Amino acid sequence: MHSMKLILSIIVVLGLGCGNGPPASPFFFIQMADPQLGMYTDNADFARETELFTTAIEHANRLKPAFIVICGDLLNRPGDEAQTDEFLRICSLLDKTISIYLAPGNHDVKNEPTPESIDWYRERISHEKYGFRYKGTYGITLNSSLVHSPDSAMAAYQEQLSFLKKELRRADAGRYRHIFVFTHHPFFLETADEDDQYFNIPIERRKEHLELFEKYGVEAIFAGHYHRNSYGETDGMKMITTGPIGKPLGDDPSGFRIVKVYPDSMRHSYYALNEVPDEVILDEE
């Protein structure tokens, strides 16, 4: 049985090892979402997801990003031990020089998280919220299922909100060039005032969080959950929703996003798994 230490050790190494200030040079990272092992066959098996996720990791090993972030729905059935073991096994194939960060999805901690479901995720997979740093970039990873549906774990929701405020203040005080937030649920798909729906955060908590993000200069929120791509913006802050590693629910094929980070800008593109470039070229700004 694979241990959560596989991932937590990577988080600690990068999170504590890098400082702030301007990047010494441009870099790129890969954002993935929704490998969701078991979705294709409604939990009968996860052969197709294994194939797709393994291909994604092989691409990462070849491209050598600074790090990878996977924005939730790692599994299809919360608490499924076989799906968990297979997810962690495939993660272990990643080159050990590449750090990996995970954000939990609703299929990992349940649609309405409980203290028990959160504890299970922490024990078997990873921390569900944390900050990390790389070359002038500050990343914050959140449990967005708590933001979406906090009623059964209100203490955990309040704890996460306090954590978020602390991390944003820390990033702001450190004068980081880029602040990125990584979640599973998009806060919105296209417009910040759009109606509530399954794929976004309810507007009451959405508004509170977006005000915090805007106050501290968050540049972009990266999410998954939608199983297709979507893009929005509010007051200059980008909401980037990325299609799935696993099963698509729209026209966008299984794939991932490559994000290029420069001292004063950020660029991103989504690639189908069969269209990933041979190398990532970091152009001059």
Image (cartoon, grey):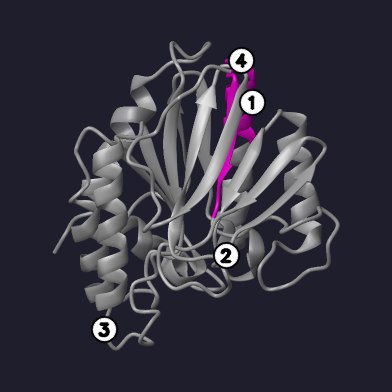
Q: Earlier in the sequence, mark 4 or mark 3?
A: 3
- Count neighbours of disc 3 (C-alpha within 10 A) and say few if under 14, some if 14 to 19, many if 20 or more: some
Residue type (three-letter) at the residue carrying disc 3: Asp
Where are the magenta residues, as a range? 165-183
Q: Earlier in the sequence, mark 1 or mark 3?
A: 3
Task: Residue 169: give x, y in percent of width and height.
Answer: 64, 26
167 within the magenta span = yes
On the image, which quarter does residue 3 sit in? bottom left
Q: Label 4, on which residue?
A: 175
Task: Residue 158: give x, y in percent of width and height.
Answer: 63, 51
Foreground mark, 4 or 1, reads 4
Task: Residue 241: give x, y in percent of width and height.
Answer: 60, 55
How far apart are the alpha carbons under marks 2 and 3?
23 Å
On the image, which quarter does residue 88 sit in? bottom left
Residue type (three-letter) at the residue carrying disc 4: Arg
Residue type (three-letter) at the residue carrying disc 2: Arg
Q: Which mark is residue 169?
A: 1
Task: Residue 194: give x, y in percent of width and height.
Answer: 83, 62
How far apart are the alpha carbons under marks 4 and 2?
33 Å
Q: Which mark is residue 228?
A: 2
SS class, disc 3? loop
Residue type (three-letter) at the residue carrying disc 1: Arg
Q: Label 3, on which residue?
A: 45
Seen in the image, is 258 located left or right of residue 57? right
Residue 207 vs residue 275, the one in the foreground: 275
The residue drawn where x is 69% and y is 55% is 187
The residue drawn where x is 38% and y is 58% is 273
Q: Earlier in the sequence, mark 4 or mark 1?
A: 1
SS class, disc 4? loop
Q: Earlier in the sequence, mark 4 or mark 2?
A: 4
The quadrant of the image that shows the N terminus is bottom left
